[in-house]
Image (tube, rainbow, N blue to C red):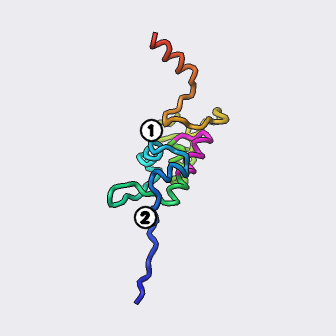
Amino acid sequence: MNKVKTMNPRNDSIYPISVVMNMTNLSARQIRYYETHGLIKPARSKGNQRLYTPADVENLLLIKSLLDKGLNLDGIKAIMNGPKPVETATTTAASPTAPLFNPQRPGVPKLTSLYPVNNQEALNDLLKHKHK
């Protein structure tokens, strides 16, 4: 009698974080950050090592693409968690006036930090002033 093996998506978790970093060009910190926000849910090995599925890698690439297009994490969560009513597609419940997408940010630069600065010049001036 042959047993039929059913596919469990968590059994397909084969990539350690180092491989996922190379596949997505994201840092380990960024990947873990998206996990803490519930955007991905990697499985864990017996030794508690994160193991990622091809679907997790696809989700990370989608997150990266949406960030490059100007969406913030609330907008990305709205897209990844499925359709929402029209009024929540442009604002968040916690902050009803905060837009999920800022069309005034054409050509959003590639993220070099989890904490991007919109006005680098103003930040540099402020830091120079504080160091005097």
Check whether the beta carbons of the residues at disc 1 and disc 2 lie within 8 A of each other. no
Q: Report if residue 53 is visible in the image.
A: yes
Q: Measuring 48% from the left and 17% from the top, which residue is drawn there?
A: 127
Judged from this view, the residue extending furthest toward the top is: 132
Q: Measuring 43% from the left and 55% from the top, which residue is drawn there?
A: 41
Q: Does the magenta stretch mainly form a helix, a strand or a loop?
A: helix
Indicate the amino acid at tag 2.
Answer: Arg
Q: Nearer the viewer, mark 1 or mark 2?
A: 2
Q: Measuring 44% from the left and 75% from the top, which residue is drawn there?
A: 6
Residue labelled with disc 2? 10
Q: Residue 109 at what x, y percent from top left?
A: 62, 35
Q: Which residues are magenta?
A: 60-72
Which quadrant is home to the N terminus? bottom left
Q: Residue 4 at what x, y percent from top left?
A: 44, 81
Q: Nearer the viewer, residue 38 or 6?
A: 6
Q: Nearer the viewer, residue 82 or 25?
A: 25
Residue 34 shown left or right of residue 106 in the figure: left
Indicate the amino acid at tag 1.
Answer: Ala
Residue labelled with disc 1? 94
Secondary element type, mark 1: loop
Secondary element type, mark 2: helix
Q: Any magenta on residue 79?
A: no
Q: Residue 11 at what x, y percent from top left?
A: 43, 67
Residue 102 shown left or right of residue 1 in the figure: right
User: Taking 97 as reference, is 62 above or below it?
Assistant: below
